[in-house]
Amino acid sequence: MKIKMLLFFCLLFFSCKRDQKETVGIKKSSINFKKLNRNGLSNGNLYRLDNFPSNYVKSRPVDVWLPEDYSKNNKYAVLYMHDGQMLFDSTTTWNKQEWKVDEWSSKLMKERKTKNFIVVAIHNIAEKRWYDLFPQKAIKNLKEDEKITMLHAGYDDFKEEELNGDNYLKFIVNELKPLIDSNYSVYTGKENTYIAGSSMGGLMSMYAICEYPDIFSRAACLSTHWVGAAPIENNPIPNAIFQYLDAHLPKANNHYIYFDYGDQSLDKHYPQYAPRVDQILKSKGYNATNSRNLMFKGKNHSENAWNQRLDIPLTFLLKK
């Protein structure tokens, strides 16, 4: 019996060592962010890992933006953002628009309107974007016939089993965040970990703070795509999403959440949902200090619209 027990503990020890070695090996192989020489970058420096190896999502580029005066002697908050290829350089985007994240971030830090921070920009994979960014658990609030309605609303190839929002968050929380925390001079607690995006990225930012309230303390959701898929009459998806939000949004306490919307192009479908958002925020104890749900008249659904007001959510998330 003693020999068997000894063998058991020996096997357990070497198994743990092997697992530890494999974990470190994955981590080291991932540390290959290369500085980009980008003429379209106005401020700071951008570093890219071309293919992030993930067990949860399709491999994709991840960028890390550092302010010009980034120093390992200082500590920085971290802002995770979706649709990373659209954030910094309009010369490389499909529509020649950008969020101007580097311009606004540098300006606000220089003016001491925000704490010091870095940005982790997660690129989307076009054919996977909707499946990665839809708040997956909300689909459970749809009846089967309502799912069929959604299929006839421009999502003919919809496959529920391909929804990947939960894995997308696991990728950020379990793979990407540990890499950032261990290789950059950043605060690792939720008090300095934030997430932001627009449209489907707005839905996913909302989903992130609901699913991982102990990881993300603040979220910004611009032009949140409450319709979920294609805008149609009697759309069942918004109610399914609001049912999820009502059940899972963390109570205010130390959390902050920002929503906004325009009234032109795709954004014209969003104002009707503002009262429901306000009601849910109020029921969870949010107020003017820790939440926003702002309308921007005359603004459409585009990077140019978002870059014109980006200082507002950035200041809200990162104010000192």
Image: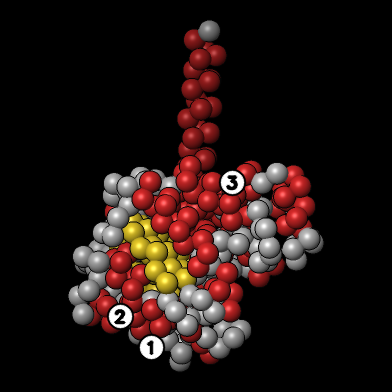
Circle 3 Cα neighbour tier, 10 Å, few/some/many (<14 / 14–19 / ≥20): some
Q: Position of residue 124 (x, y in %)?
A: 59, 68
Answer with the quarter of the image where residue 58 lies: bottom right
Looking at the figure, which quarter contains the C terminus?
A: bottom left
Residue kind at label 3, given as amino acid type: Lys
Q: Is residue 141 left or right of residue 74?
A: right
> Which secondary structure lies at badge 1?
loop
Residue at x 25%, y 63% (from the top left corner): 75
Viewed as shown, does residue 282 lie left or right of 156? left
What separation in Å lies between label 2 and label 3 (alpha carbons)? 36 Å
Do the CB atoms of the residues marked 1 and 2 lie less than 8 Å apart?
yes
The amino acid pointed to by label 1 is Ser
**Residue position marked by numbered label 1 in the rendering:** 42
Q: Read off the residue under disc 2.
A: 106
Which of label 2 and label 3 is nearer to you?
3
Which element type, helix, strand or loop, lies under badge 3?
helix
Residue 209: x %, y % from top left = 43, 52
Q: Which kind of residue does numbered mark 2 sit on? A: Ser
The numbered disc on residue 137 is 3
